[in-house]
Image (cartoon, grey):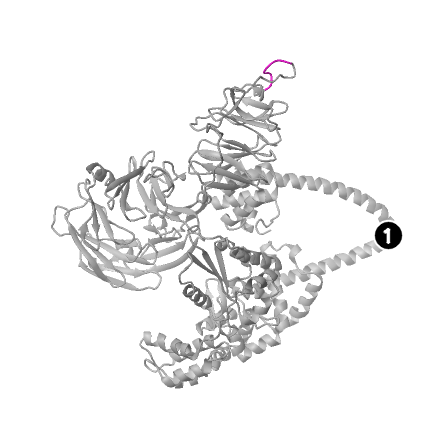
Amino acid sequence: MRDAADTDVHADLGVATGIVAGCAGQRPAVIRLLTPGAHPARTHEALFAPHSGPGDTLLVVDQFEEVFTLCADPAERARFLAQLLTAADPAARLRVVIAVRADFYGRCAELGPLAEALRDSTVLVGPMAPARLREAVVRPAAARRIVVERALTARIVADVAGEPGGLPLMAHALREVWRRRTGKTLTLAAYEAVGGVQGAVAHTAESVFTACTPAEALAVRALLLRLVNPGDGTEDTRRPLDRTELDADADTATARVLEHLVGARLLTVDGDTVELAHEALITAWPRLHGWVDEDRDRLRLHRGLTEAACVWAELGRDAGALYRGVRLTEAREVFGEGERRARQGELSRLERDFLAASVAAHEQSRRAGTRAARRLRALTGGLAVLLCLTVVAGATAWRQSDVSARQRDEAEARRAAALSDTLRSTEPRTAMRLALAAWHTADLPETRAALRTAAAQSEQDVFTQPEEGGRALNAPAWLDGNGRILSTVVDDKVVQWDVRTHRRIRSVERPGLSERVREVSPDGRFVAYQGPGRKDVLIGGLVDGSTRRLAVGERLDTEVAFGGGGRTVLVRWRVPGADDGRATLELWDLRRQRAVMRYEHGSDDGAMPVLSRDDRYLAWCDQDGARLRVLDVTTERLVTGQAPAATQRAVCQGELTFTADQRAVAAGTPDGVVTWDFRAGRERPPLPLDGGALIVEFTGDYALTWGVGTVAVWRTDLPTPPGDLPREPLLTYPVQSSAIGDFRLDPEEDVLRYREGGRTSVVRTLSLHGLTGRDWREKAAPDATGRVTVAGEETLAVDPTGRTALTYEGTLVDASTGKPRQGADGADGAEGVRGEDVLTTAAFSADGGYLAAADPQGRITLWDARGWRRLAVLRGSGSTVHPVTLAFSPDGSLLAGSAPDGAVQVWETATPTVPPATLRAGDSPVRRLRFAADGGLLHIATSHLTDRVAPLAPRAAADLVCARAGGGPTVTEWRRYFPSADYRATCGT
């Protein structure tokens, strides 16, 4: 529990630091920070999934009071509370820490389950002691060689100690004293000049206000009141708002005062979000405090008006979202025309339009009512007859209209479901949203199949960098370590993009960079390039703007590469005048800016040596491409070991990389991936890959390979034969580009990202969801052949009654005697699967109503098991080396069958001719299929023994698609793909 007095904009960092310090001996694997905001359950749902690796995930919820101050929806608040309480389960790998202001602690008791959880796990965090306050003043100044007068330190400590809201007020006061410093000395006189701790914020705010014109003064009041959330029995709190809520055009008073307040550090702007820099400003500045007290009830009504106007805008200004009745009456009284003239600028343009539209709709309704009343009084005599006729005609028209609307919606839904399949590889996020919207528009077999396919599709997102100066498609580009940040160099600028949100993070200009760029660090924080005149190597900070110089001197043919951890830089240059390819290697420590290793070697094959992620080993191949060299950086000795000549030649064919354990060097070759363990002195078993591998990279328990046109993900930690590697990949995916620049695995989000082409800026994201986790196996038949012996004859399947069995020839036999069953005409063997060749797989539904059968070529047919007639050919013949696996859901409504490429297709037995849903389960053969008891989940076991769980219940599949696609279609997307259907929310409903 946080002290209400000491809330600051950096509270979340302070809470995280305290949590880490308190976790000694049992540090969590991952720490995640969040503040609830207005929609906590919807915004932060993904953060409640535990980290996929070992150890607990710690979730820190700072400023928990926003659940009461900003979240106005009780249902949203309840969902967020339920998400938090999942951590109460001892078996859960999620732990939650809540930081809440003391004056909101009583509100937590209103939430029954939360109050129970907090009863024995509350820690009260009090204000800072005087000694800690003194350190907070003196130590940062000393670090910058700034002198603080002792009298000033004593005065600040005396003013702040025990003072509510003291820390943010102290921060502002020190900032003002810094602006009035004498040389490098912070003086007591400057402190007193700004009014001390209590007066500094008020002094700054009052100075800005008194310098405003009358129009700007009104804008200041309107803007600041928008940034305050009036308390209801609690303290007033700040309210972040989106800039779209302001009419802040460049020439308006609002824009000017926003600039003044930000310049005075009274407001902060983060992207499109504006908020008070100090919550203490509400109480420390008497003028603002008086405004809030004067307009407290008015502010509450204004907040409701703002929210209603935003909803109206999101719904395309639908008349159904306008104010009516009591709410309209209150709004007209408080924000009517006369009031608006007196308080110019109080309402935004959207709020004014919303209120005007509400009033206009009310007046139109009133006039219509008046006219109707006059007509009713004039036509009372004939109304009864007309009313009866109208009711009959209206009911008929309504039924016809309803049928027409339903048919229109079904046609739109089928079209969208088909379109989602065509967009899956080029626009995967749009494809998922289309499938979701199609199912919400009409619940049909086609839309359910599209929804199930979307929930299991590998493709998750495609990001194409927008052009800048027309050079985006040819700019050098790099992905960071987990593929979340794309860095490109365009016109002497490093431009960085967030691949997940498609937003630009930053643009940093470095003159001459585009002519000499060499490398971007794995964490995306630095760029390395050669200085002017080919002298030295410069390391440019992309976050802090710093420049570090590595004094390598003036060199020719200089090449640079960052170490795997981003802590070191490897520099190589050729020896001048040497014809034998001799080169010099230097390893530089970035933090100390000095070389920690220098090594000269005879020759190499021209490729840049590779540095291990722990910065201990270097690997390269000699010029003839036949000898591998591994150097221990700490001893500067070769540790290659006695590698066979054939192994060295094979490794030197491709791009070198170190394995995840840093004990071996690997490379992709035409025969697959070859690995030399130089620590053990032996070759590890290869990764076989049809067509060979051009690039290989190891990340944790996975290996990533790229061959011609295919990306593959392999598990390297599976319990295969000792020291062996998996024979089949978890996933292969065809790439559209002829080359790949980078590919990165993000284990935390279970996705693979790769950048197409050598110098293009298109990044694709593939989901690995469900390809990792606990193993699942289903017991085989007693003889391990998958066959059942009945009365001495091998059969494929036995019906649920146990009295009838199906043979490989498609004949029904008596399970007790093995004799063919007689048909209705009395002929032996008349009943069974007619017109089929030898069968390899068959399955009965649990109620005995259906039979599915497959032949050696993978052809699948569905039969009525009571009348023995074929209902449909579900899949035609094709070449397959693996037998088909079949399974019915418990109620017989769904049939799942494996495909030769490792996918699983799911048909609805009631409509077998509708194209099935396709679930990607990796590329290894499917061994077992099993439905959950309620039929809502399908368990898929492959040769990797992983349990891939696919949601088949439409609601569960829709929830998964919402999470993966970042929500449903926007209003713009809906109008584009569903022009004749009304918009409807598809997620969070």
Q: Position of residue 619 (x, y in %)?
A: 23, 47
Q: Position of residue 841 (x, y in %)?
A: 50, 26
Q: Position of residue 381 (x, y in %)?
A: 88, 50
SS for tag 1? helix
Q: From where the camera sits, is residue 57 visible? A: yes
**Residue 370 vertical placement versus 797 (above, below):** below
Which residue shows up at 61% across the image and 67% down it?
A: 302
Q: Nearer the viewer, residue 579 or 860?
A: 860
Q: Amino acid at mark 1?
A: Thr
Classify 10 Å Cα crowding around label 1: few (below 14), some (14-19), many (20 and above). Answer: few
**Residue 801 vertical placement versus 442 (above, below):** above
Which residue is farthest right?
381
Q: Within the image, what quadrant is residue 67 found in?
A: bottom right
Does the magenta portion include 310?
no
The number of numbered discs placed on residues in the rendered structure image is: 1
Q: Position of residue 871 (x, y in %)?
A: 59, 26
Q: Nearer the viewer, residue 422 or 744?
A: 744
Numbered range of the magenta stretch: 826-831
Which residue is farthest top?
827
Which residue shows up at 69% across the image and 39% down it?
A: 403
Asked if residue 886 lies left or right of residue 376, the reply is left
Does the magenta portion include 829?
yes
Magenta portion: prevailing SS class: loop
Q: From where the camera sits, is residue 424 visible? A: no
Q: Circle 1 is placed at which residue position?
A: 380
Q: Nearer the viewer, residue 339 or 571?
A: 571
Q: Nearer the viewer, residue 984 or 129?
A: 129
